Every structure is written in C-alpha cells, then in structure tokens.
Image (cartoon, coloured by chain):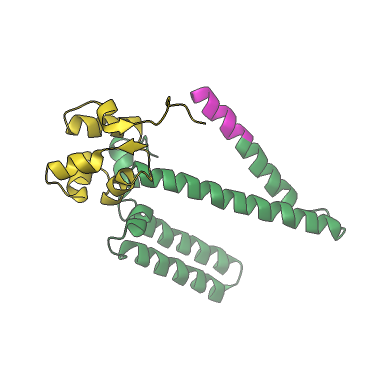
Chain colours: A yellow, B green
Amino acid sequence: MRNNVRERRSARGLSQGDLGDALGVSRQTINAIETERYTPSLPLAIGLARFFGTSVEEVFHVDGNGRKA
Amino acid sequence: MSTATGGKRDVMHSKWTVPAFSVVMGLVLLGANIVGHQLVLGLWSLGILVVFGGAVALGGRSETIRGLRGDGRDERFAMLDLQATAVAGLAVLIAVIVAFIVEVARGHSGEPYDWLGAIGGLAYLAAVIVLRVRG
C-alpha cells in the first residue's frame, strides 16, 4: 500500500527509530511500512495519522478502487 | 498473544520468559531422562537448551533475537511469528503424513503417526470453528 510516511517523518526531522518509539513499534517496522513491504494494522495506521495530525486517507493510498484483485 | 494486556503482556514480553522456559524444559528433560536411566542424554538436552536460552537472553539487539525474546515484539513481528508458526506446523504435518504412508507401505499400522495426524487435523478444525465464532 502506497504511503507518504517517509516524507512526513523526514519533514519533522525524525528518525525511523524516533517514530517507532513514539508509536510503540520497532524501527524495522517503520522501515517496512515506508518501503511498502508491510501494511500496518488499522490501529497502527490510525496512530500514524494522528501522530502526523492528519487522516489515514492522507497518509495511506490504495491503488485503483481499493479492492484486491 | 497480541491482545494480551496488563500483567500477562508484561510476562510474555519479558526478555527472560523464553530463556527461563528453555532452562525449565531442559530440567524437565533431564528429569525424564534420569527416570529413563539416560543421564548423559539428559545432560546433553539440558546443555543444548541452556545454551539456546543463554543465546536468546544475551543475543544483543537484533530484531530477530529481540522478537524471539519478546522484548522487541510488535504487531509486525507478531504477524511474522504467526506465519512462521504456520510454516512450522505445515512442515510437521507433512512429515507426519509422509511417515504414516511409509509405515503403512511397510505393512505396519502407522502408529503413532496416525493419531499424530489426527490431532493435527482435529486441532485445525477446532481452531477454525473457534476463531470463526469469535469473529
């Protein structure tokens, strides 16, 4: 799932470890989300959006109509 | 495990849970081997599990070690753990089925692989039903 976590994190001058600590997950998990190797759970996605002061839809983007092929 | 809260979560996420469990299992195996008059085998079992527990406890901060240990476990590692458990279970089930077929082909009854396979199949069905009911 496409997302702009890396851009938002970088804009705040945070490391992956800083963001992971703030959300209670590992640095590797933040990296996996940013590189789109891992789709976070809904609670974590909401946590990320709240951390950045925005909505989930502004952080995560589903290609097409959002349905799996 | 991922839904555990409070004290239970603290215990499951303690870095000492897996090492302590390894040592306890080693002692249990030592006791069983002593009862079975196989002291040397029991000491080997205890030694292997103590070394494993020590490696997990003192294994540094790699994500794999911390995930196995429990203190670095988050939702992604819980998912990895779930998938790894499924792969391990599938490997065991395939081994049991192959062993059962080989035993039957040799003219044996297939024990104990028949009931081991039955346990695996019934446990899977029970888990599907319970998980479906829980939603």
Predominant secondary structure, magenta span:
helix
Query: Picture quarter containing residue A40?
Result: top left
Tell me where residue B102 appears, x and y as whole percent: 79, 58
> As rendered, which of A66 and B26 lies closer to the eye?
A66
Q: Is residue A6 left or right of residue B64?
A: left
Tell me where residue B22 appears, x and y as whole percent: 42, 60
Residue depicted at 24% across the width and 34% down the height: A48
The extreme front residue here reads A64
Quadrant placement of the N terminus of chain B? top left
Q: Is residue B55 left or right of residue A11?
A: right
As displayed, is residue B27 above or below residue A4? below
Tell me which segment is drawn in magenta: B125-135
The extreme bottom residue here reads B40
Residue depicted at 35% across the width and 66% down the height: B54
Tell me where residue B57 appears, x and y as whole percent: 32, 62
Tell me where residue B80 appears, x and y as whole percent: 43, 47
Residue depicted at 13% across the width and 42% down the height: A11
As displayed, is residue A61 above or below residue B133? below
As displayed, is residue B94 above or below residue B135? below
Query: Picture quarter containing residue A59?
Result: top left
Residue depicted at 38% across the width and 43% down the height: A38
Count how many numbered circles sit on residues in the image: 0
As displayed, is residue B121 above or below residue B31? above
Q: Is residue B70 left or right of residue B30?
A: left
The extreme right residue here reads B107
**Residue B112 visible to an observer of this rendering:** no
Query: Does the segment drawn in magenta span residue B50?
Result: no
**Residue A5 visible to an observer of this rendering:** yes
> As rendered, which of B134 and A9 lies closer to the eye?
A9
